[in-house]
Structure formats: C-alpha cells, structure tokens
Amino acid sequence: MKLHELRDNAGAAKKRTRVGRGPGSGKGKMGGRGIKGQKSRSGVAINGYEGGQMPLYQRLPKRGFNKPNRKAYAVVNLGLIQKFIDAGKLDAANITEDSLVASGLVRRKLDGVRVLAKGEITAKATISVTGASAAAVEAVAKAGGALTVATAAAAE
C-alpha cells in the first residue's frame, strides 16, 4: 500500500451539503428553503413561537417540582456485578465504588453508586457503596457476602 492509495472506509466521511451553488447541485438558488417567508430569511428563531398565539408549552398545566440539588446516583445491578466477577474484572473480596469505575462497570461515580437487586449474585462478595436497595442487601447476604452502605441517609 502506498500513501496515495489511503482512503477512508466507505461511508465514514459524509460530505457537507453546500447549498446555493447552482441548479446542478439540487440545492441551488433558494438552497432548500422554499420561496419567500420568514423561514427563508436569515436570523430566524421561532422554536415554539405560534404567531402571537399563546404557545402550547405555556397553555398546558404545570405540575410537580424538580429539586435543583437532587442526588444523581450511578446505578449498578447485581447481575452485572456477578458477570464482571466471573470475567475476572472485579475482585469479589473487596468491591468499592473506585474498583467499579476502574473495571469499567460504572462510567463515573456522580453523587455515588447505588446497587439494585436485578439479576442473580452467587459470589461471596464484599461490596461497599453509597446506596443500595433493601432487596440488594438481602440478596448479597443470602449469597454469603456483605453489602455495606457508606451513609445511612443515602440508603432508602
């Protein structure tokens, strides 16, 4: 293979559509914007605008409350932890939030890691995390391991 023979894989690089470059391009003259009107002109920002009528998002009733300082936990299921132990990516004797991140099971800790009981765990694992469901704690104990929650307030 020579330098001039190098090519991208087919479909890897899509060429940008250059609008307004003649009739042969299929996007010439009006550049796909149609004829006249507000949207054919530059500087248009009309998302959600309904021509002076009260927009839909303002007409609909609002309910509930989004807590601005709520905690966001990285969620892990027991079945996945078991899978990673079987693959040798996790050491069952000592599983911490940092080891979960290092193994690639969790991308980032966020406000902590919360373990849920989906899936089966058979390994005798010692897990220490920020939060866990009651069913997860029970399942780990049943398998002969221990699941400790770092802060009592975090576990619901």
Image (tube, rainbow, N blue to C red):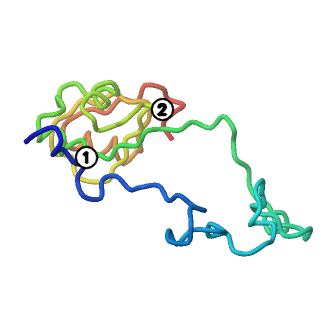
Residue beneath label 1, please?
80
x and y percent of residue 104 in the render? 27, 35
Check the picture and name the quadrant holding the N terminus: top left
- Residue 83 in percent (x, y) is at 18, 45
Is 66 on the left-hand or right-hand side of 57?
left
Q: In the drawing, does residue 107 fall left or right of residue 79?
A: right
Circle 1 SS class: helix
Identity of the residue drawn at 30% across and 53% down: 12
Q: Which residue is mark 2?
A: 110
**Left or right: where does residue 102 sit relative to residue 115?**
left
The relative height of residue 126 versus residue 26 in the rendered view (above or below) is: above
Amino acid residing under circle 1: Leu
**Foreground of the two, 151 or 83:** 83
Instruction: Report which quarter residue 62 is drawn in.
Output: bottom right
Q: Identify the residue shown where x is 16% and y is 33%.
A: 89
| 7 to 70, vertically: above or below | below
